[in-house]
Image (tube, grey):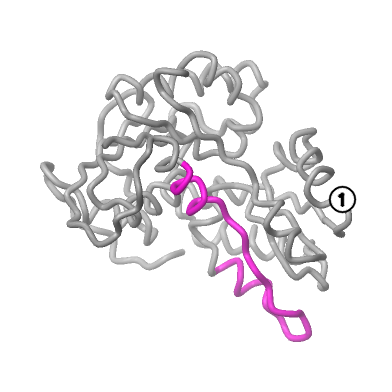
Amino acid sequence: MKIALMDAGIGLLAAAAAVRRLRPDADLVLSSDPDGMPWGPRSSQELTARALTVAEAAAVHRPDVLIVACNTASVHALPALRARLEPDLPVIGTVPAVKPAAAGGGPVAVWATPATTGSPYQRSLTEEFAADVNVTEVPCPGLADAVEHADDMAIGRAVAAAAERTPDGARAVVLGCTHYELIAERIRAALQRPGRPPLALYGTADAVAAQALRRIGHQPTPGTPDEGTLTVILSGREEELPPAARVYDEGRLLQAGRRGRDRLPLSSGGRP
């Protein structure tokens, strides 16, 4: 079994690690586009073209399913990706977890990139699944880029600014960018202030990993030996995981489980 994931950058690590935990024996193909980052400021046409190129680089390796582990790409490019690749290669999109967050009641805050915040796509999710819930959209300029480069100081500034824009009464926060899941506990710590009720964070990694397995008819087998390979494609080039990826727990999990390739020394730093 081979599962491919695509994103502009290292935001795909969260979903890839979730797949690895569910199926340690799965071969993983991670295809990203560091040469074309960031995707958010690009026009929909430009973003779609780059997403198709990244997806096709993964498809060369003949995976059984492709996870689009990027909210922005799912908003703009998912129809084109499915038109190009399906039915031969099933494509799984990533949708901000507004529905489960709203099901627990409100108020809800949705942290997302400026490109996703206020988009018709995100507004439609709110109207469909959270019409009776107080939802606040919180744009997080610079946060995804800071996470991408493991820039600790920039992450701290962006998280603090977004936390200030989050209403004190929020009971749930949707992490509307896959990069944010790599620093989920840091976000939780910034939001959990005196007088604020306990917060639930809602990401997508576990859900899309489980959905990908269901789509290709496989069950989770977390107790199996870790024998899956890892192929990393950076703007069409097969390389190693970038150093910034190995700063995060998810990147270290994937690197530690590699088979059939030389292992690189891991960063000694913790989660930024």
* The magenta stretch spans residue 219: no
Q: Looking at the image, is 44 positioned above or below residue 216? A: above
223 or 265: nearer the viewer: 223
Q: Residue furthest bottom?
A: 194
**Residue 129 x/y as whole percent:** 78, 48
- Please give left or right for residue 229 compared with residue 124 in the image: left
- Please give left or right for residue 18 compared with residue 143 in the image: left
* The magenta stretch spans residue 196: yes
**Residue 230 x/y as whole percent:** 24, 41
Question: Which amino acid, by three-letter code, is at mark 1?
Answer: Ala
Q: Which residue is located at x 55 percent, y 35 percent? A: 93
Q: Residues within 10 Å of mark 1 (few under 14, many from 20)?
A: few
Q: Looking at the image, is 216 positioned above or below residue 84? A: below
Q: Which residue is labeled 1 in the image?
A: 131
Q: Quadrant of the N terminus?
A: top left
Q: Secondary structure at mark 1?
A: loop
Q: Which residue is located at x 32 percent, y 28 percent? A: 63
Q: Which residue is located at x 48 percent, y 47 percent? A: 148
Q: Which residues are magenta?
A: 186-211
When asked about the image quadrant of residue 159, the answer is: bottom right
Q: Which residue is located at x 67 percent, y 44 percent? A: 113
When asked about the image quadrant of residue 248, the answer is: bottom left
